[in-house]
Amino acid sequence: MSKPIVAIVGRPNVGKSTLFNQIGKRRISIVDDMPGVTRDRIYADAEWLGRAFTMVDTGGIEFEEETFLTPIREQARIAVDEADVIVFVVDGRAGVTSTDEEVARMLRTAKKPVVLAVNKIDSPKQEADVYEFYNLGLGDPIPIAASNSLNLGDLLDAVTANFPDDADEDVDTDEIRIAVIGRPNVGKSSLVNKILGEERVIVSDIPGTTRDAIDTHFTKDGTKYTLIDTAGMRRKARIDEAIEHYSVLRSLRAVDRANVVLVVISAPEGITDQDARIVGYAHEVGKGLILVVNKWDIYEGKDEKSTLRFTEDAREKLPFAQYAPILYLSALTGQRVNRVTELVKYVAEQQSMRVQTSVLNELLRDALSVNPPPAHKGRPLKIFFITQAAIEPPKFVVFVNDPELMHFSYVRFLENKLRETFGFEGAPLRMIVRGRNEKEDD
């Protein structure tokens, strides 16, 4: 079951990003804990009373005054289309504005739950200012102060109360689920059509749980696949800056449901910031990852040097996804499209690889002899053993005398040793460092 999506909407400067950061319990929109993933991440996984969800912040873009309302409407429309619950944030000190009314009109016509959060209400004498917002026709407004987390519990109670029922999906565990994601106009639909046209073995087309997407089931060489196509979710409306910036929202649910993610990139345009956002999300949630560089038939050069140059650029701009294989193809001509399912199956196997503890510790002993861990402030780091705790993605727990002595560079060294020995191509590895007496689970 994919996590519910909660979109935070509203005009600029009402406190959307502050609320987003408080719920995420870290300054997600300002400071990223993984350099290179994205400079302005707009999504985060969150949890309230055991209910996990994905939160999306629709703030962060500055607009010219004369074109103010159109981008606001576009942001709200995208959020309404893709989210399970909408949190509409307004400024309690400023009162109801014409822009608030504009967004509220759109939200009233949507068949989606809306929770109205009146922000900047941080004293009892301001609570009377909340009543004005009943005029928006969106139910009971909830007074909050995002800056100091006042009443955030009440807000999150209202949000989670509107989540869909956790009905189990009918998922065939023997099939490989593939999400095809990427920016608009990079060729996602063409690639999907080419894959299915080449195979000519479609079993069925049935509605998926991804809103407005279609799950297409097919079989090749005895392996069952499901294509989760997000390409059909894009409206034919003009793609402007706001839609481009928030198109990542449409990929979240499909990625959550997939085993392997194909991120489609346009070769002539190269790696963009939006590509980095989309790749970053797939990486962070631990999915098998393949970078598909489409339109290679019209890329300047198209020779071995061009391939090497593009690969180097991708590795530089996506440093967190060095493990992801890159497939250069043309959905238009069919060049190398026949390699897609073969590579998907390989990455799915890498994601599910399990290594025996005895073999892992033999590797650890070899690694320690080649590169002993450095001491920190005169205290030696002792690494006792390593074990694999999970698959999809592969997760390894390293037990040491003191986790604070384990520098991230040595963790990276051990990860590289695992990849050199076992491969794990296309699979993000999770390295957990524990004290000797700590439990293995998170």
Image (cartoon, rainbow, N blue to C red):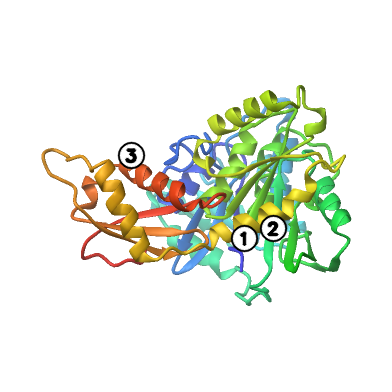
Identity of the residue drawn at 71% across and 33% down: 241
Disc 1 is placed on an element classified as loop
Identity of the residue drawn at 77% across and 57% down: 109
Q: The C terminus appears in which quarter of the rendering?
A: bottom left
Q: How many numbered badges does the structure rendering display? A: 3
Residue at the disc numbered 3 = 409
Identity of the residue drawn at 48% across and 48% down: 19
Residue at the disc numbered 2 = 178
Residue 121 visible? The answer is no
In-image side of 122 versus 117 (left or right)? left
Q: Counting other residues with Cα less than 10 Å from the Cα at mark 3, is it few (<14), some (14-19), or many (20 or more)?
A: few
**Circles 2 and 1 in contact, beta carbons < 8 Å:** yes
Residue at the disc numbered 1 = 259
Marker disc for residue 422: none
Q: Nearer the viewer, residue 2 or 262?
A: 262
In the displayed structure, would residue 157 be above or below residue 254?
below
Q: Nearer the viewer, residue 350 or 16?
A: 350
- Say what amino acid the circle numbered 3 marks: Ser
- Say what amino acid the circle numbered 2 marks: Ile
Q: CA distance from mark 2 to mark 1?
A: 6 Å
In-image side of 149 versus 171 (left or right)? left
Residue 109 visible? The answer is yes
